Amino acid sequence: MTQEKELTPLLELSARVGQNPLLTQASTGNASIKLDGRLWIKASGKWMADALCEDILVPLDLAEVKECARRGIDPTVLYSNASIETSMHAVLPHRVVLHVHCVKTIAWAVREDAPAQLGHLLHGLRWQWIPYVQSGLALARAIEQALSIRAGTDLLVLGNHGLVIGGDDCAAVEDLVGEVQRRLAISPRLTPYPDYAALADMADRFSWDLPDDDDVHALGTDPISRRVLSGGLLYPCQAVFSNSSTAELFRSVRYYDMDERLYRDRPFLIIEDRGVILNRTMTRAERAMIGGLSQVVGRISDTSPIRYLTEAEVHESARVVTNNYRELANAGHDSGR
């Protein structure tokens, strides 16, 4: 009963966060609490939005996980269903830890000048910037190093990745999330209206789906969004959920150049000045991710100095993550379009 009482606030927080697409999309993000020598953490591939209707948490031996991290062993070797970020949660000293792919944070975290910009925006908070590091052990070690230099940090902004917040309890963590959301707020651009008539005709010819989300269509209708996407990949999940290691998939195609034979195997098409259509093979998770991408890109200005992922970073991310994370994320969520 005591354990259930302790876990309930984390599950309720996870559900609220998971149902907010500006904080997490599909199975991205994770939450944990340290109780009586155990690390209760969201299992890999689970959706935080399902926290109140599914068993999304797994209990791990905290000392064992820490020892794995100390010896350079990924805990997922011992716990196959553990989050890829288990090491990060274990090395952080906070009782409650929340990691989210907050679109407002990512819109800042993909900038080359992010540390300077965030220094002004987050002034007064106990925060640190972590330049992009591959998820897993590498990220955990980078965080350990940062904390050894500046103990007492409650907030970490991860370059090209997201946000990590720690606290004594769920209420403190949620309050800090709200404060960060307020400080990093960027209004999405006003964008041209989609050409639904042309898109409907094309979706019918391809036997694809037509999204009813104007923000997703902005990936095609908005010239700034098209320019941002054409430059490279912004963060790992963009590559993982599209199963693409280059920006080619995200470059728009011209409406009058459309040829079904050339594009039938793509998960989606961004059509210049018109909008977006989705292959019916796209899972619910993949659709949530493209929705998140549209929210991030819509908050990046045409003058932002963007720091794209390098080719090596994209390939390493695919190697570490894709083999189990993408499949688990899609499991049980293949329908629901």
Image (cartoon, rainbow, N blue to C red):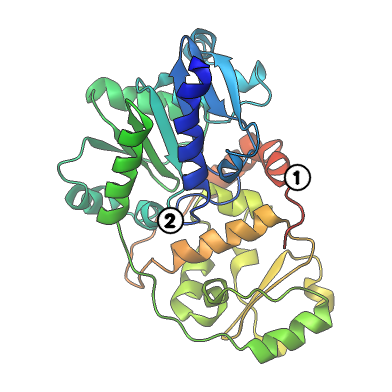
Residue 31 shows in the view: no
Name the amino acid type tagged 2.
Val
Query: Which amino acid does the dot numbered 1 rest on?
Result: Gly
The residue drawn where x is 29% and y is 52% is 114
The image quadrant of residue 130 is top left
Q: Position of residue 176 (x, y in %)?
A: 29, 41
Front disc: 1 or 2: 1
> Which residue is at 64% across, 31% downward?
55
Q: Residues within 10 Å of mark 2 (few under 14, many from 20)?
A: many
Q: Residue furthest left?
A: 124
> Is label 1 in a helix, a strand or a loop?
loop
* Front position in the image: 66 or 167: 167
Question: Mark 1 packing: few (<14 Cα in 10 Å), some, or many (20+)?
Answer: some
Which residue is identified by label 1? 332
- Mark 1 or mark 2, which has the lower sequence index? 2
- Image coords of residue 231 (percent x, y): 49, 65
Quadrant placement of the C terminus: bottom right
- Residue closer to the observer: 264 or 292: 292
Q: Nearer the viewer, residue 307 or 294?
A: 294
Say above or below: 337 vs 237. Answer: below
Label 2 secondary element: helix
Give whichever of 332, 287 is nearer the camera: 332
Return the x and y of residue 304 as percentages of the image width and height.
33, 65
Q: Tell me if 45 is positioned left or right of 208 in this view.
A: left
Q: Is residue 311 above or below residue 125?
A: below
Which quadrant of the view contains residue 253? bottom right
Residue 157 appearing in the image: yes
* Percent x, y of residue 252: 61, 76
Task: Determine whether, in the image, residue 184 is placed left or right of residue 250.
Answer: left
Q: Report the disc number at residue 103.
A: 2
